[in-house]
Image (cartoon, rainbow, N blue to C red):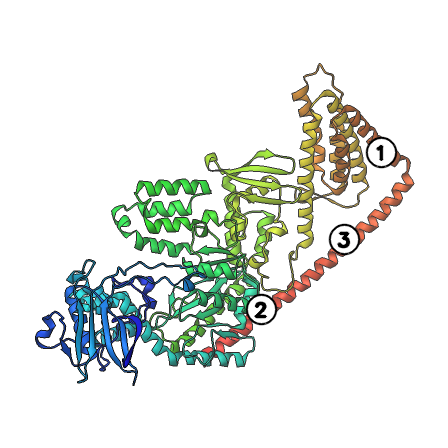
């Protein structure tokens, strides 16, 4: 024998694809589905059709062909008429010169799937392909003669499967061909910015039907992809040259290329110095958007954006992705994280995409990942269009179910009711987004910061940073000019917002010190949002629902709408509150429900831990200015508020214990009388003015109040016996007497009263008597040591005087630092305006 057999297994159409299916390839498989090979050496892509009567003949042994290609084309033409797809199964080469001397063409369903354990045992198969090979024996064998012609040496006609009807034969792989005129039309429409779906619609209309087009939308996509890659080679080089130039001008300009710079096609990421600086201020939440198709090649342009202190979109970096594989996204996220100094965000929002989700899980394991709700709504209109047309109310009910449910239980109940009512329980896409509900439905995400002012309002940062600058017709050579214009426009808007915040004062709608405090801390837009919540408290009532000693639970609801109540848990001692609506956790601003509780508990100013620096006018300042020019006044208000709430909380606990029996009542009254005397002494010797209910009160006024309250106590503090109407009268009398302590809430009262409460917390009467006697003894000892008291008061006054001087110095220092920051900001605004004016003049 002069020849040997070399086995291989490829298809006539789609050689080397590695796929078995011939009934068409879905969109997910399109990237691995190459076009059918061309027949002959013309390169036109046309199918070779035998001339004359051969086109209607059935193959037979002894039939001759001028070449191997002619035999292949004849068998493929025969297969098209009959209704099956073909591929090359094996060949035999000459030992002398290696030339092919024998070919076997088979039905594409010949043989069985080869399960290669070495290829699959170490990796998970994400998209298992359907089994299409069923062991069909149909084939055509040809052999080259000494004359150079090819003759049929074997033919098997019978198939063991059903054949494809004529109107579906164009879906078979070996019969899908893109003709020369079709390629020309595709090129023209692609250059105009049209996508494969619209191009296929135009081709179907042009040729009079899909079966006459000769190929599928998948083939069109693959051809356009290959066309893009060929066209991109020059423009990608322009992109790399631009990035190198920017880095040379400023070493803080970061860029990276996946692979070597010399590669013709690469994934690219870059971040300018301003983007990297912005991330240090506002990098707590990030949006990664791949919905842009910014140029005529439809190359995915993917910006990383966030939200600044004015609620405006801010840029954190950009990328061009040639392919959107998981490996590409992993590389991109790792590169971006490196550019951002390795600090991952608290939360990230992306498109609803399984590949992106997998990459984020690997790179940002601690970051809360959210799918963009508005993209899901848009997809819903496409996937459920038939439901929208049939049921006009469905869309409104769907949005209500997602956006307006207040708890997880309410959402689950509403969702099940919705899908049952419209018979959608088995809808595949709807079930898929339901399974992913924890990553896009607001009620599951409210415990994480996303910097959104409203759960039902779309974030300005999503898909809006470059809107109006780049579009489907923008090519890469134009892109960076428009990119720079977009950056200038965004920067100008931020400068304008800074100017408005620093140089204009908002209109206050209430006399609340909290509103004035917020107007001086927040930026203009954020203050308007806070003011909206503060004014909204006027329509809400807050009533105590539970008190466990440390945390008080309030029920907050609108007048007459108790069935729609929110629940606020308030820790008086730590001045911390949490609401069931979780607005602060989600947006960083306090909700009207917590503010309503602050109103009824006399919290006059915002506690510092509820003022996020990223929302303040000093968000970009390196100096921490938690207090403003009125720091001393604010500190007095806050300290008074803390004292007032703490003391009142302890007093009511004391009342409950003291009113339990006659003995505890008598002991409690003795303790209160002693406390009143000590308060009177402390107030008389205190040279400072007293702050009452947010206003300054003189020592004379305070002493007058003490004497009046003390007289009332003497009248109403007679001991009671067991025969008295104990419970109501005891409780009322004791509560009336502690009004003194509620109204006089300075540091001395708090210290004395806490000491008394500590001893009175024991329930046995003997312990209460001991506590009362201890207090009386303490008071007598203090009275007997006037000289010691005088010395202590002198030292105390000196200490307080020094403390007040420190407060004044501190206030002055903070005022100077504030002035410096304001001056820096004004200089920055002037510089930006000068730059803009120079560019306009050029």
Quadrant in the picture for residue 692:
top right
Callout 2: SS: helix
Residue 47 seen in the figure: no
Q: Residue at x 61, y 40 (%)?
A: 601
Quadrant in the picture for residue 756:
top right
> In terms of depth relative to the viewer, which is nearer, 495 or 565?
565
Q: Residues within 10 Å of mark 1 (few under 14, many from 20)?
A: some
Residue 746 is situated, as x and y percent measured from the top left of the image, at: 73, 42
Q: Which residue is mark 3?
A: 804
Q: Earlier in the sequence, mark 2 or mark 3?
A: 3
Q: Which residue is mark 2?
A: 826
CA separation in Å, label 2 and label 3: 33 Å
Quadrant in the picture for residue 673:
top right
Q: Which residue is mark 1?
A: 779
| 1 or 3: mark nearer the eye | 1
Callout 3: SS: helix
């Amino acid at each position: 024998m002069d020849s040997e057999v070399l086995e291989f297994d490829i298809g006539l159409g789609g050689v080397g694809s590695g796929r078995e299916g011939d009934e068409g390839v879905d969109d997910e498989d399109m990237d691995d589905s190459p076009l059918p090979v061309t027949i002959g050496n013309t390169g036109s892509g046309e199918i070779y059709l035998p001339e004359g009567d051969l086109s209607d003949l059935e193959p037979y042994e002894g039939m001759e062909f001028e070449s191997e290609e002619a035999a292949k084309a004849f068998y493929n033409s025969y297969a098209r008429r009959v209704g099956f797809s073909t591929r090359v199964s094996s060949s035999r080469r000459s030992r002398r010169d290696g030339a092919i001397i024998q070919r076997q063409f088979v039905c594409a369903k010949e043989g069985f799937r080869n399960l290669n354990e070495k290829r699959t045992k170490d990796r998970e198969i994400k998209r298992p392909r359907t089994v299409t090979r069923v062991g069909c024996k149909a084939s055509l064998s040809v052999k080259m003669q000494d004359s150079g012609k090819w003759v049929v040496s074997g033919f098997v006609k019978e198939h063991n499967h059903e054949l494809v009807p004529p109107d579906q034969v164009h879906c078979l792989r070996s019969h899908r061909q893109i003709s020369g005129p079709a390629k020309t039309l595709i090129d023209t429409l692609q250059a105009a910015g049209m996508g494969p779906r619209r191009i296929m619609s135009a081709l179907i209309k042009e040729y009079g039907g899909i079966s006459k087009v000769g190929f599928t939308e998948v083939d069109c996509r693959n051809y356009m992809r290959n066309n893009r890659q060929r066209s991109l080679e020059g423009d990608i080089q322009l992109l790399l040259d631009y990035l190198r130039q920017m880095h040379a001008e400023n070493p803080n300009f970061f860029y990276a290329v996946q692979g070597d710079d010399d590669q013709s096609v690469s994934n690219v990421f870059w971040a300018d110095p301003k983007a990297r600086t912005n991330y240090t201020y506002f990098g707590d939440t990030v949006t990664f958007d791949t919905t842009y198709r910014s140029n005529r090649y439809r190359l995915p342009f993917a910006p990383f954006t966030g939200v600044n202190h004015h609620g405006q979109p801010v840029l954190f970096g950009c990328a061009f992705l040639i392919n959107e594989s998981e490996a590409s996204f992993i590389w991109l996220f790792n590169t971006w994280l490196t550019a951002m100094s390795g600090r991952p965000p608290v939360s990230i929002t992306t498109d609803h995409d399984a590949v992106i989700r997998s990459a984020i899980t690997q790179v940002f394991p601690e970051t809360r990942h959210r799918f963009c709700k508005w993209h899901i709504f848009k997809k819903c209109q496409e996937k459920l269009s038939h439901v929208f047309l049939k049921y006009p109310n469905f869309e409104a009910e769907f949005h209500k179910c997602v956006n307006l449910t207040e708890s997880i239980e309410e959402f689950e109940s509403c969702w099940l009711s919705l899908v049952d009512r419209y018979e959608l329980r088995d809808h595949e896409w709807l079930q898929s987004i339901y399974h992913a509900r924890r990553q896009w439905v607001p009620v599951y995400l409210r415990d994480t910061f996303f910097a959104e002012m409203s759960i039902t309002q779309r974030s300005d940062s999503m898909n809006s940073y470059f809107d109006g600058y780049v579009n489907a017709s923008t090519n890469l050579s134009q892109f960076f000019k428009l990119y720079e214009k977009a950056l200038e426009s965004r920067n100008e808007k931020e400068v304008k917002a800074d100017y408005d915040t620093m140089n204009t004062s908002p209109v206050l709608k209430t006399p609340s010190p909290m509103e004035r405090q917020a107007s001086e801390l927040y930026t203009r837009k954020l203050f308007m949002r806070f003011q909206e919540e503060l004014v909204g408290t006027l329509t809400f009532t807050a009533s105590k629902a539970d008190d466990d000693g440390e945390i008080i639970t309030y029920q907050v609801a609108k007048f007459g709408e108790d069935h729609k109540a929110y629940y606020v848990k308030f820790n008086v001692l730590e001045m911390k509150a949490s609401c069931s609506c979780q607005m602060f956790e989600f947006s960083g601003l306090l909700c009207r429900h917590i503010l309503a509780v602050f109103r009824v508990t006399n919290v006059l100013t915002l506690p510092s831990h509820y003022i996020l620096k990223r929302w303040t006018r000093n968000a970009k300042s390196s100096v921490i200015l938690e207090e403003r020019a009125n720091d001393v006044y604010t500190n007095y208000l806050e300290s008074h508020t803390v004292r007032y709430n703490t003391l009142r909380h302890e007093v009511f606990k004391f009342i409950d214990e003291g009113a339990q029996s006659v003995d505890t009542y008598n002991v409690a009254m003795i303790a209160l009388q002693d406390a009143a005397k000590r308060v009177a002494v402390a107030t008389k010797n205190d040279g400072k003015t007293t702050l009452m209910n947010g206003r300054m009160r003189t020592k004379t006024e305070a002493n007058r109040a003490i004497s009046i309250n003390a007289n009332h106590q003497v009248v109403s503090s007679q001991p009671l016996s067991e025969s008295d109407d104990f419970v109501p009268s005891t409780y009322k009398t004791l509560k009336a007497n502690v009004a003194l302590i509620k109204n006089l809430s300075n540091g001395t009262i708090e210290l004395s009263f806490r000491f008394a409460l500590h001893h009175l917390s024991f329930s046995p009467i003997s312990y209460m008597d001991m506590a009362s006697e201890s207090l009386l003894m303490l008071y007598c000892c203090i009275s007997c040591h006037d000289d010691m008291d005088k010395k202590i008061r002198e030292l105390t006054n000196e200490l307080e005087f020094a403390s007040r001087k420190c407060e004044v110095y501190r206030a002055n220092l903070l005022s100077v630092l504030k002035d410096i920051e304001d001056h820096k900001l004004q200089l920055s605004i002037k510089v930006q305006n000068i730059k803009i004016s120079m560019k306009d003049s050029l």
